[in-house]
């Protein structure tokens, strides 16, 4: 089993990363992603309680991971990673899995949660950087009115529900990848985009922006407490950053405009107010520093 981090990476990894305003184009992002994970190969002789011989044979014949169908490997996501050969199998399929499942709302699966279980913050720098580039590009395309290419959108929900689900999922992925929350929310606040305004308002009613990991699959289980504390700390930093961008004063001004120009957004501001007031979180500067140090400890 491969190590999750090279020794040289441990000293170079920042705590939080800038939101990249000039990421590579979609094709290059995808090529970099596949290249970063090309070192991994599937491991076989899968658990027979979870997978049949036919299940494993279907994945063995999936072919090039850049063009594989979801039907050929998607079943690995619904069992414990160790049942399908461990982290190497998961990472081999991750680039294609992101393309086909990240916005597949007919599948009850969020691949970034799987990445967090496998210790995402401890992965080699080039793998994390490739993921950050991809999601910065996806965010810029989506929130500026385009499609979330190269991620394939699959949903039976209404367009309004779908737009909100996509927006929230992209923002949460960027936070999991430790994009600086304040920079991310500030960028969304500056964007002249209904989607950006909608997700900022909607997220103010969320109790958490980064969910705790249900279980980890780590080479070194002693890392688990640090990672758990780091996730909690980053969630607090994200909630604080959101409140500093989506302030009551700004939301009142936004409601005044939306009441004339976008009644749907105005109603969203009104409907989220009770939970927003209940869950509002503002940290002191000393508390922000403390939580950043906790995240830093989890990263290195």
Image (tube, rainbow, N blue to C red):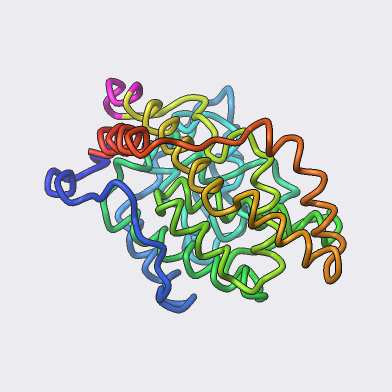
3 in relation to 102, above or below = above
- The one nearer the camera, 219 or 296, is 296
Locate residue 169 relative to residue 40 in the image: left or right.
right
Locate residue 27 relative to residue 155 in the image: left or right.
left
Q: Position of residue 91 (x, y in %)?
A: 41, 47
Q: Position of residue 239 (x, y in %)?
A: 53, 41
Name the image quarter holding residue 152: bottom right
Name the image quarter holding residue 251: bottom right
The secondary structure that dominates the magenta segment is: helix
Residue at position x 13%, y 43% in the image = 7
Locate residue 31 relative to residue 289 in the image: left or right.
right
Residue 158 on the magenta segment: no
Residue at position x 55%, y 25% in the image = 48
Residue at position x 41%, y 63% in the image = 19
Locate residue 135 relative to residue 168 in the image: left or right.
left
The answer, for residue 97, to whether it is visible in the render is yes
Q: Position of residue 180 (x, y in %)?
A: 40, 53
> The C terminus is located in which quarter?
top left
> The N terminus is located in which quarter?
top left
Q: Position of residue 18 (x, y in %)?
A: 36, 61
- The one nearer the camera, 89 or 266, is 266
Residue stretch in magenta: 219-225
The answer, for residue 85, to whether it is visible in the render is no
Name the image quarter holding residue 107: top right
- The one nearer the camera, 144 or 133, is 144
């Amino acid at each position: 089993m491969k190590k999750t981090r090279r020794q040289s990476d441990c000293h170079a990894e920042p705590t939080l990363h800038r939101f990249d305003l000039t990421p590579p184009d979609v094709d290059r992002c995808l090529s970099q992603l596949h290249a970063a994970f090309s070192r991994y190969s599937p491991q076989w002789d899968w658990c027979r309680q979870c997978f049949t011989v036919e299940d494993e044979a279907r994945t063995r014949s999936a072919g090039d991971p850049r063009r594989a169908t979801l039907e050929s490997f998607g079943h690995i996501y619904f069992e414990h990673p160790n049942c399908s050969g461990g982290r190497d199998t998961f990472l081999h399929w991750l680039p294609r899995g992101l393309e086909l499942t990240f916005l597949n709302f007919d599948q009850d699966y969020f691949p970034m949660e799987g990445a967090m279980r496998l210790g995402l913050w401890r992965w080699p720098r080039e793998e994390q950087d490739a993921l950050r580039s991809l999601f910065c590009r996806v965010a810029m395309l989506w929130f500026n009115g385009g499609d979330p290419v190269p991620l394939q959108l699959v949903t039976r929900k209404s367009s309004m529900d779908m737009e909100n689900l996509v927006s929230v999922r992209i923002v949460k992925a960027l936070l999991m990848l430790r994009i600086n929350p304040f920079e991310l929310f500030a960028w969304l606040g500056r964007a002249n985009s209904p989607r950006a305004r909608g997700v900022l308002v909607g997220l103010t009613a969320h109790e958490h922006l980064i969910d705790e990991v249900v279980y980890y699959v780590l080479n070194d289980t002693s890392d688990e407490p640090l990672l758990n504390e780091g996730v909690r700390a980053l969630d607090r930093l994200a909630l604080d950053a959101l409140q500093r961008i989506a302030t009551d004063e700004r939301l009142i001004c936004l409601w005044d405009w939306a009441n004339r120009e976008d009644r749907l957004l105005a109603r969203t501001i009104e409907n989220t107010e009770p939970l927003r007031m209940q869950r509002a979180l503002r940290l002191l500067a000393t508390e922000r520093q403390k939580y950043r140090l906790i995240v830093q400890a989890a990263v290195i």
